Image (spheres, rainbow, N blue to C red):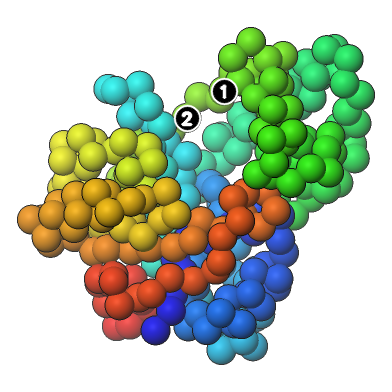
Amino acid sequence: MRVDLHVHSNHSDGADSLEAVIEKARRAGVTTLSFVDHDITGTYEAALPAAEAAGIRLIPGIEISAYDFKRGRKIHVLGYSYDPDALNIKELTGPLLARRHKHSLWQIERINRAGCKVDAETIAETAKPSRVIYKQHIMQYLTDNDYESGAYQHLYKSLFKGEGPASGDIEYIDARDALHAIRADGGLAVIAHPGQMDSYDFIEENIGLIDGIELLHPDHDADDHARIREIADRYGLALTGGSDYHGSFGTAVDVGVDAGMLRFERQLLGYS
């Protein structure tokens, strides 16, 4: 069985429509899918008709952009199978989305001042499905180069990193608050790609709030797999996985992972 519990669409910072991602999943033989678009819960209902038509089980999902303030590093928190109203999650992520959009408009202004002509209205139209502008939308306006090309990465870093005119970041959600909100809405809280973000210490300290760890991810190697399995076995946690697919806005990956390597709680797969 093939599943993918970590895909993104143009409802956040992915390039492809919901229908396009679902079609890729169908062709790959994926039977269970979860859109975890950043900080929004509406993707599930919007994607459900297309998923049902493709014969794919769809799981409500979200990836919350959070922060470990103790260690001063980002943490991404995945939430699955939460109550459709998601009142606690929305209360937490609504202000975050507003901050992100405002910051992106500031970045566009700064890039314009630096001499690169960028039209905010055109970018906003491109970002319409997400209703929030991301850096990927700004980059799409500025260049036709492939995401993984040297030219793209050079431009991205020169604008958004270090001394770049649009460098800086937003204030993120406390990761513990994200865990609490997901659980308050009846969902399962999973730490995303801890190998990528070095979230292992945070997991150990907050194990009572965590239901699972993302095992399979393009940025994880054999050492990450061993470490994650050891922690999950010790505390009886679920193991999830996915491609972290962003289409042309991210690293080239195929949709779908081998579910035989994972361990789900029944609630995560939507069974009673």
Quarter of the picture holding the N terminus:
bottom left
Quarter of the picture holding the C terminus:
bottom left
Residue 177 in view (yes/no): no
The residue positioned 33% from the left and 82% from the top of the image is: 271
- State how far apart marks 2 and 1 are (Cα): 9 Å
Q: Amino acid at mark 2?
A: Tyr
Q: Quadrant of residue 241?
A: bottom left
The residue positioned 37% from the left and 27% from the top of the image is: 73
Please give left or right for residue 82 compared with residue 232 in the image.
right
Q: Amino acid at mark 1?
A: Asp
Spot the residue most to the front. Answer: 150
At numbered mark 2, what does the secondary structure look like: helix, strand or loop? loop
Residue 212 in view (yes/no): yes
The residue positioned 61% from the left and 56% from the top of the image is: 252
- 270 up-or-down from 221: above or below: below
Spot the residue most to the left. Answer: 234
The residue positioned 71% from the left and 61% from the top of the image is: 16
> Quick check: marks 2 and 1 in contact, CB under 8 Å?
yes
Instruction: Give how far across and how far down residue 66 sits, in percent.
Output: 42, 36
Q: Nearer the viewer, residue 189 or 198?
A: 198
The residue carrying mark 1 is: 169
Please give left or right for residue 236 compared with residue 151 in the image.
left
The residue carrying mark 2 is: 172
Instruction: Give how far across and how far down residue 177 sits, in percent.
Output: 34, 38
At numbered mark 1, what does the secondary structure look like: helix, strand or loop? loop
- 67 up-or-down from 36: above or below: above
Q: Quadrant of residue 158?
A: top right
